[in-house]
Amino acid sequence: SQQGEEDPQALSIQEGENATMNCSYKTSINNLQWYRQNSGRGLVHLILIRSNEREKHSGRLRVTLDTSKKSSSLLITASRAADTASYFCALDNSGGYNKLIFGAGTRLAVHP
Amino acid sequence: GAVVSQHPSWVICKSGTSVKIECRSLDFQATTMFWYRQFPKQSLMLMATSNEGSKATYEQGVEKDKFLINHASLTLSTLTVTSAHPEDSSFYICSAVGDLKRESAYEQYFGPGTRLTVT
């Protein structure tokens, strides 16, 4: 399967703690993207990391990519209750056609 | 900028009827749109890739005669679920890719989704 595999499937933390989600995959990729989805809603793009990049930051988000291990991680620092959502990694290995294969997702619950 | 809308946001239909879902890019031209379906607490599964002015490309296992896709303009793609059955009940999400010359060429902008319930 080309699908990314994420772990953990679910994560429950307290506000202020950091949350780390991991994504592993099996194929080569052009880029890997992380998305957030609130329950029953559309997806919001968080970060895109290209295959030749190792780390990217955006506000409280930090994404790493290790192509040798075929894995990526998303770190949310100083989490807030509003960060409660499902987080998906998505692989683009379509050679420029922007076709994404989504992982199973991690359901994050941040408790006040 | 980069807003994608879907209409309707939810729909209930009877088994055997057809339902059309619209996906519009409101402030940019989308050369490519994608259609996904998502079952409860599951991931998004890509159904098809829709390119303006050409036939859609369907993923393996997706029936093209059942899920008709039309991308008639650079701002509109439609998905028609024909002869819907209860197992077609799902959350359908579209996304759009804009001008590939821009920095954010790889970013997909997602619509809010359409929840289809077939009774």
Image: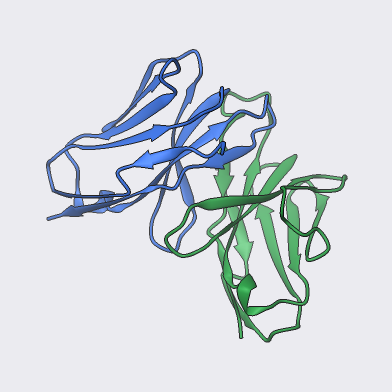
Q: Nearer the viewer, residue B36 or B27?
A: B36
Q: Colour of chain B?
A: green
Q: Quadrant of the C terminus of chain A?
A: bottom left
* Name of the residue lying farthest toward the right: B54
Q: Quadrant of the N terminus of chain A?
A: top right
Is residue B68 in view?
yes
Q: Nearer the viewer, residue A19 or B109?
A: A19
Residue A93 horizontal side relative to residue A4, left or right: right
Q: Colour of chain A?
A: blue
- In which quarter of the view is residue B24 placed? bottom right
Residue A28: x and y in percent read: 56, 22
Residue B32: x and y in percent read: 72, 41
Is residue B2 in view?
no
Q: How many numbered dots are placed on residues in this image?
A: 0
Residue A63 horizontal side relative to residue A43, left or right: left
The colouring scheme, among rainbow, by chain, secondary structure or one colour, is by chain
Residue B41: x and y in percent read: 42, 61
Name the residue rendered at 48%, 37% in the picture. A4
Q: Nearer the viewer, residue A112 or B38?
A: B38
Residue B29: x and y in percent read: 71, 42
Name the residue rendered at 75%, 60% in the picture. B78
Residue A74 horizontal side relative to residue A67, left or right: left
Relative to B45, is A92 above or below?
above
- In which quarter of the view is residue B91 placed? bottom right
Relative to A74, is B5 above or below?
below
